[in-house]
Amino acid sequence: MEWFVAPDYWMGRLVFQRGLAVLYLVAFLGAALQFRALTGEHGMLPVPRFVRRVAFRDAPSVFHWRYSDRFYAAWCWTGCAVSAALAAGLDGLVPLWGAMLLWLVPWALYLSVVNVGQTWYAFGWESLLLEVGFLAVFLGNDEVAPPVVVLFLMRWVLFRVEFGAGLIKMRGDACWRKLTCLYYHHETQPMPGPLSWFFHHLPKPFHRVEVAANHFTQLVLPVLLFTPQPIATAAASLMILTQLWLVLSGNFAWLNWTTIVLALSVTELPGTAPETPAAPLWYEVVVLVAAAGLVALSYRPARNLVSRRQVMNRSFDPLHLVNTYGAFGSVSRMRHEVVVEGTADEVPREDAEWREYEFKGKPGDPRHWPRQFAPYHLRLDWLMWFVALSPGYAGTWFSGLVERLLENDRDTLRLLRRSPFPADAPPRYIRARLFRYRYTTWRELRETGACWHRTPVRDFLPPTRLEGAVGRRASRR
């Protein structure tokens, strides 16, 4: 069937597949390096405890059958190896059926990780990576030209990512409609980047232009993805420019980069398409059946888009095959940060020697300039931003963090930039305080060298210690 393939998109497919493989690699690497303190056997939210209370059908994962830290680590490092092989082009060296199975492996591996990740993995980019990764299974390799229906489904994902984000803004915070949200967003976003301070200090009229351009990108351009070329390419190219602007202005894990590789699959990139034989019948049948299933599953996400009660970043099936997306329906006007401190003093008085723990990505010491981490995802740092918004986001994991800091837990300390206590001398008490943070002015930056100015607001957690010499429970004083 000649209509089944689109040879002109072979370069877009190639770039998309290599880019997606790199993003898989980043995701598995983050899981392998961070899991012990987050979801390990002795982590803040242990996987074994989770799988005892959640049925397999609700969160399919291999870890329902077996879990150990060693097995989980091997699972993640296997994902790294397969992703690296795909990034290097291994799928082009095997038969078509082999390439499909090869692309199925990282999707299945990461699905098992996400479905037991709990609040650490409750982000839209996890579902986006899985949805896009599942589509990659059916894109084929050099033996066939890219299938039209799969390319269409990739545009449908890109449409929902952008259009969903645009609608949630228009239905949410009034500052989006007034074009004033970026007066605050660069300062209050979850994890600022090295250029965020400069973005914040752009003139306010420019911020209004930024918001207007964002509305155009998210509410108008997505519709043009389904128009003939070169209009679709132009729309996708503008989306890529917008996403690169977001990459420069903050740290949003691999959300922006996944959107970019999706947009690249829409464009007609230069290059002569190689001669390929007709697609095998079995391949056409498999692709069409999978596409029909995904279209059927699209009903609820599509209904969500037009609903007045639109939700964002929601999966409607446990396999994360078709999801709904969106971000920043509301924007904070002030930035608060939870600062965690410890003391070795016998009595935790206010005038005790309190030493501050430094996180890798979230603001702490006002003189420490933000760094670029994305597409790598610092999960603990992101959750600390939510906790500063409301103590309700702390759940049980924050007390687990405190306990592990009191024990100088090695895996937990690896998630931090620096611990103020020697490895053999943990603190006696931990406390947390809430601070109001704002960017310094140009004058303050020149005079102090600090990019942040902070003022104390209130206590967040009173001085807390372990009940026993080797306990795992903490008590407050």
Image (cartoon, grey):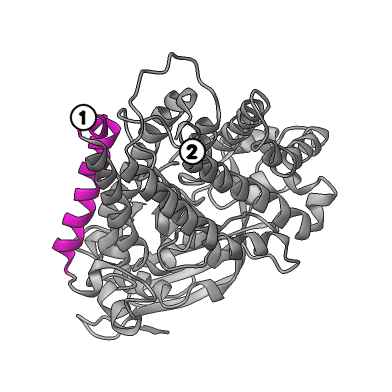
Q: Which residues are magenta?
A: 68-94
Q: Residues within 10 Å of mark 1 (few under 14, many from 20)?
A: few
The residue pinned by badge 2 equals 257
Image coordinates for residue 238, horizontal then vertical, percent: 65, 29
SS assignment at label 1? helix
Residue in the picture at 29% in, 56% down: 108
In-image side of 253 versus 473 (left or right) = right
Examine the structure image and report whether residue 84 is included in the region drawn in magenta. yes
**Residue depicted at x 21% and y 81%:** 469
- Where residue 404 appears, as percent x and y from the top left, is 30, 70
Q: Earlier in the sequence, mark 1 or mark 2?
A: 1
Count of all numbered marks drawn on residues in the image = 2
- Tell which tag, 1 or 2, sits nearer the viewer: 1
State yes or no: residue 395 in magenta. Answer: no
Say above or below: 119 vs 273. Answer: below
The quadrant of the rendering that contains the N terminus is top left
Left/right placement of residue 260 relative to residue 29 reads right
State the residue at coordinates (44%, 64%).
340
